Amino acid sequence: MNRLLVIRHAEADGHDTSDPGLSERGARQAQALADRLALDDVSRVLCGPRLRARRTAQAIAERIGVIAEAVPYLDDRTPFPSADRWGDYPAHRREWLDDTPADERDEDGAGIAAAWQEVSGMLEADAPGTLVVVTHAFVVGGFVARALNAAPDAWMRLPIDNTGVTEFQRRANGEIAVLRVNDTAHLRDLQPDGAA
């Protein structure tokens, strides 16, 4: 596979701490995404273990006829600076970062870096096919930052919408290019909740 689509899960039904599934709107988002990806050469679908990521991945996998594989390294996490790395982040973000739940803190983004190594290592320049990864917003942003060797806080400046598609490709020279970020064209015709 030489192409990677990293996707944020569809809209969740409830608060993050309860590991919610998808809302009604989220189910429609996941179906619109699955319909879009049915036209692609998808070889494999991976997802994080949380229910909202698994349900989104299952919609895609069922539509294209593969099995979605849940893996722990794609779980929800937030890059969190270690004591000596607070200078890598703007001071106005400190209070927001301090509110990050302890179980989601990824010290210096080490977990996201390891996940990126795992996922990007599956790409080969001369191998056709697409790997789809369904995960969480900060993981998607972290992957983009890693691919571009961006500043440690770059993920904070990348808005990633529900079912936003971010595309990477391994090129013949070995580099991984970021082709698009947060593409939501498949949601264009999706009616908001309550609309006829």
Image (cartoon, rainbow, N blue to C red):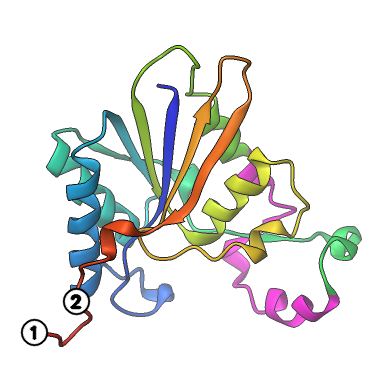
- Residue at the top extreme? 126
Tell me if mark 2 has few (under 14), some (14-19) or many (20+) residues whose alpha carbon lies within 10 angstroms of its own: few
Work out whether 33 lies above or below 64. below
- Identified at 59% across, 29% down, the residue is 176
Tell me the number on the disc at residue 191. 2
Amino acid type, mark 2: Gln
Is 95 covered by the magenta stretch?
A: yes
Main SS of the magenta part reads helix
- Percent across and percent down for residue 74 are 47, 47
State if disc 1 and disc 2 touch (CB < 8 Å): yes
- Percent across and percent down for residue 93 are 75, 76
- Identified at 70% across, 74% down, the residue is 97
Q: Is residue 71 left or right of residue 51?
A: right
- Identified at 17% across, 49% down, the residue is 35
Tell me the number on the disc at residue 184. none
Name the quadrant of the C terminus. bottom left
Is 38 covered by the magenta stretch?
A: no
Q: Is residue 90 left or right of residue 67?
A: right
Q: Is residue 16 left or right of residue 116?
A: left
Name the quadrant of the N terminus. top left
Work out whether 11 lies above or below 176. below
Q: Quadrant for residue 106, please give it.
A: bottom right
Please report the bounds of the magenta region as a residue range. Answer: 91-113
Q: Secondary structure at mark 2?
A: loop
From the image, tell me which residue sits under label 1: 196
Amino acid type, mark 1: Ala
Query: Real-space Cα distance between discs 2 and 1?
Result: 8 Å
Depth check: give the residue in front, 195 or 84: 195
